[in-house]
Image (cartoon, helix red, strand yellow):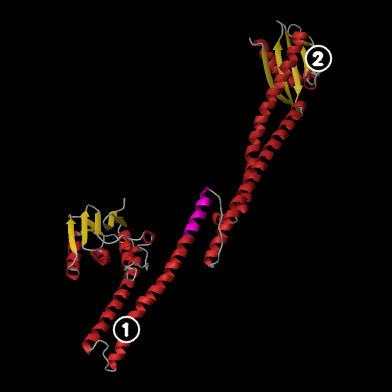
Amino acid sequence: MYKKFKGLSLIRQLLLILIVIGILFAAILMPVVDYNLHSIVDNQMYDTLTESQNSIILFGSIPNDKKTRAVKHMIYDVSLSSFLSSNLNTNDLYDYVFGDDLERLIESNKSTIENKKDFIDKSYYYLITKISDNQYIISLMADDYSDELLIALRNQVIYIQYAFFIVIALFLIAWVLSLIHPLKKIKDYIDAIKNNEKYDLNIEYNDEIGIVSKALIEMKENLDLQESIKEEMIHNISHDLKTPIALIKTYSESVKDDIYPYGDKNSSMDIIIENANRLDHKVKSFLYLNRLDYLQGENKETEPFEIKETIEKVATQLSLVHPHLNIELNLENVCFIGEEEHWRVAIENIVENASRYAKSLIRITLENDYLVIFNDGEHIDEDKMEYLFKPYVRGVKGQFGLGLSIVEKTAHMYGYEVNAYNLENGVSFQFKKKK
């Protein structure tokens, strides 16, 4: 049932809810209203009896209006055991309506009593008041007037309630329609994204719909950026792969024809091997980046390990490859969370990137959940800083645009964040544990 309800459109859901509320209104609220109206009418009838009776006792006359004209009065004398005046069939009324209460009042110390009883096909409201030691006045009123009053009050209440219900229903329908319109625009916007079509989404809302629309616009901008990066990636990959492949192919054909572009066979083969290694490195980096994406989705639990030794190994390798660089280490015994091999690759990529820019110094500092790799090279262009860790974004001396992307993915995968900062005398890459 719930699934069928959720399968309806919003306007149909609202109409169904309003119908159910209307039924509940008629089944539950109306009996409550009727009960309260009967209480109001009963009180009104007794008030009318009191008003009319007090007028007779005090002034000897009856107020000349519709409701008091409907009141009948009679005086009962206890010493005579009879009614002194009456224009009603007092015997039946005495026997079946107010007789018991009159006798009870005579025997008690009370001065008045009011009640309501049914007789034949009517209900009678009556008020009995002691006016002297031997005389009592009985004021009586049939329910004809109370029925009229009840119907009038019920109709008035019903009209007010249903008018209020209709106003609320119209307001809710208008509100739902105001929601449907931007939701339809959002759907059209999503369809446009799916079909790669241009569509402007302009929703000036500050509520949840506005938040969703802004998030969709940001998503579209991000998708457009990724598409642009993807196109640049294809261009970069084709360029970076095309050169070594062309060299390998050309030099191999030359060696096959006993022509040695670099003077002798060994020198020419060394160039072929060097370009093959370049090609191998690019392909491995690309595959490693995709592997990190796969591992990131696994949410595999990892144990902390001491990263100091890993950094020392990377620094030793770097000093052998770049003996002209001064490598300073300020390392504490700190544990990082994650796989040691993944962090080694990430640190190697940062250090390799630093070695291309550094003038003479690379400094690595390791403190509690805090790793800084500094080089005294030129500043990073501010317009490139935002996309520095995006894949396939080439730096000034960048080669393939994957190294720093691997660094960021590794850091995020294990709950760290990495940022680059331009300092006064160089550039700093900083890893910090996320809070």
Residue at the spot of label 2: 86
268 is higher (above) or lower (below) than 230: below
Nearest the eye: 58 or 209: 209
Q: What is the quadrant of residue 133 in the picture?
A: top right
Looking at this rendering, what residue extends furthest in the bottom direction? 257
Image coordinates for residue 4, horizontal then vertical, percent: 57, 57
* Label 1 secondary element: helix
The magenta-colored residue range is 206-219
208 is higher (above) or lower (below) than 64: below
Nearest the eye: 325 or 372: 325
Callout 1 amino acid = Leu
Q: Is residue 56 visible?
A: yes
226 is higher (above) or lower (below) than 1: below
Image coordinates for residue 313, horizontal then vertical, percent: 18, 65
Image coordinates for residue 20, horizontal then vertical, percent: 62, 47
What's the mark number on residue 247?
Answer: 1
Mark 2 neighbour class, 10 Å CA radius: few under 14, some 14 to 19, many 20 or more:
few
Nearest the eye: 227 or 251: 251
Q: What is the quadrant of residue 281 in the picture?
A: bottom left
Q: Is residue 214 magenta?
A: yes
* 357 on left or right of 136: left
Callout 2 amino acid = Ser
Q: Is residue 251 magenta?
A: no
321 is higher (above) or lower (below) than 205: below
Q: Quadrant of the N terminus?
A: bottom right
* Label 2 secondary element: loop
Residue sitting at x 78%, y 14%: 74
